[in-house]
Image (cartoon, helix red, strand yellow):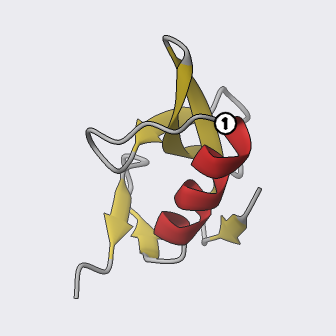
Amino acid sequence: MARKVFEHHEAVSAVVPNEGSYRAAIAIKALQGGGAPQFHKVLDGQSFGTAHEADSAAAEVLSTLVNVDDDGEPVFDLT
């Protein structure tokens, strides 16, 4: 699991089960106030055979995350 911390949020690589496979995701949680993380599926249309493969792919996507907006939505560097 990879992790990035921003001013008001933390983001971690995550995995979402998907009918016999796994999807890569980024989980974002506010640093203050608690609450459950929001999961954002990444790499649309791709699924992986193992949770480890999906988490590795999510970690790569997490490396392009440059910020989390005020609503807790990820902001990626698309260049």
The answer to whether residue 41 is above or below residue 56 is above
Dividing the picture into quadrants, the one containing residue 15 is top right
Residue 13 visible in the displayed image:
no
The answer to whether residue 4 is above or below residue 72 is below
Q: Residue furthest bottom?
A: 79
Q: Residue furthest left?
A: 79
Disc 1 marks a residue whose amino acid type is Thr
Q: Is residue 32 left or right of residue 78?
A: right
Q: How many marks?
A: 1
Residue 70 visible in the displayed image:
yes
Q: Quadrant of the N terminus?
A: bottom right
Question: At 54% across and 70% down in the image, what residue appears?
Answer: 60
The secondary element bearing badge 1 is classed as loop
Using the image as rendered, state which of residue 9 and residue 39 is in the foreground: 39
x and y percent of residue 59 in the render? 61, 64
x and y percent of residue 42 in the render? 38, 48
Q: Quadrant of the C terminus?
A: bottom left
Question: At 44% across and 72% down in the image, what residue appears?
Answer: 67
Using the image as rendered, state which of residue 26 and residue 57 is in the foreground: 57
The answer to whether residue 47 is above or below residue 30 is above
x and y percent of residue 3 in the render? 72, 64
Using the image as rendered, state which of residue 60 and residue 27 is in the foreground: 60
Q: Is residue 5 left or right of residue 79?
A: right
x and y percent of residue 21 in the render? 54, 24
Question: At 27% across and 43% down in the image, what residue appears?
Answer: 44
Dividing the picture into quadrants, the one containing residue 40 is top left
According to the picture, the residue beneath numbered tag 1 turns out to be 50
Using the image as rendered, state which of residue 44 and residue 63 is in the foreground: 44
Q: Residue furthest front?
A: 49
